Amino acid sequence: MDYSKFAGYLIDSLSPIFIIVNGRGILKCFTLGLTLKEKWNTDNTLATEAVLEDQLVKGLKLSLDTTFSPQTGKKSGTMKGAYKMDHLHFNTDMDLSLSGPVVHSAAVLHYQGWLAGAQLSFDTAKSKLTKSNFAVGYSANDFVLHTNVNDGQEFGGSVYQKVNDKLETAVQLAWNAGSNVTTIGMGCVYKMDSNTSLRAKINNSSQIGLGFTHRLRDGVQLTLSSLVDGKNFNQGGHKLGLGLDLEA
């Protein structure tokens, strides 16, 4: 066996490649799956990101983000992790604070049109759960159902239905346990033709919104909108809007 050729191949395969993209230095080692990015901005702050992806476990991505300001000596860092499967996505991040890091985590599970997700935040310094959000939903071609609970205080749900090719409708309901306030909203979109559509919405505060959108030509779209306060109709304060979207 020619060991000199083997050593040369090993060195070449492990050799990193350094490139510069948009003022950012990127160092890649393809064999190890490691990417190192560095950026120095006009605030005289050096930002570094190290990413290791699909090496320990397929679908697992680990990263470390750090910033350093030479003038003030201020430093910060965040560790992140993400794992992806066909039916499961999970991510977490933690700031590297000496006073006690805050850990944020989220996960989404998908199975046959059903979706379930959770988002949690934990403050290690206070040993306290600062955020706990949960959601369940179902999605089909012409129907979407969504429900959520935020911090055990805010409860919400929405239903979307595509009636036909021209008409789409939706209903949204929310309730806050702390303030005992309920919000209900309904809306619809009607497509008059391929270039023109009408939108309308109303909530339990008697706020009525209307919108008209028309495509004048390719890349040019005109929008007219209004918001009417039904409870104080005679007092004014209603809103009108005009928009022109240009797209090259």
Image: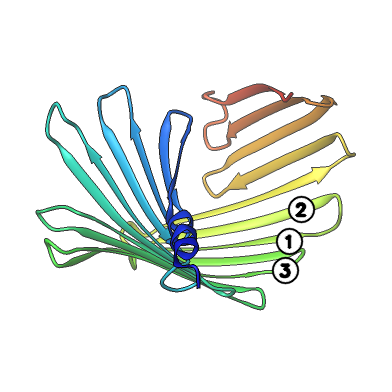
Q: Which mark is residue 168?
A: 2
Q: Earlier in the sequence, mark 2 or mark 1?
A: 1
* Residue type at numbered disc 2: Glu
In the foreground, 219 or 150: 219
In the drawing, does residue 77 fall left or right of residue 12? Answer: left
The image position of residue 204, as x and y in percent, is: 54, 50
Q: In the image, what residue occupies the spot 63% across and 57% down?
A: 171
Q: Which residue is mark 1?
A: 161
* Residue type at numbered disc 1: Gln
* Residue type at numbered disc 3: Ala
Crowding around mark 2 (Cα neighbors within 10 Å: few <14, some 14 to 19, many 20+) is some
The image position of residue 110, as x and y in percent, is: 58, 74
Q: Earlier in the sequence, mark 2 or mark 3?
A: 3
Crowding around mark 3 (Cα neighbors within 10 Å: few <14, some 14 to 19, many 20+) is few
Q: Secondary structure at mark 1?
A: strand
Q: Specify the quadrant of the image occupied by residue 208.
A: top right
Q: Does the residue at mark 2 contact the one at mark 3 (Cβ under 8 Å)?
A: no
The image position of residue 152, as x and y in percent, is: 34, 68
- CA separation, marks 2 and 3? 14 Å
- CA separation, marks 2 and 1? 6 Å
Q: Quadrant of the C terminus?
A: top right
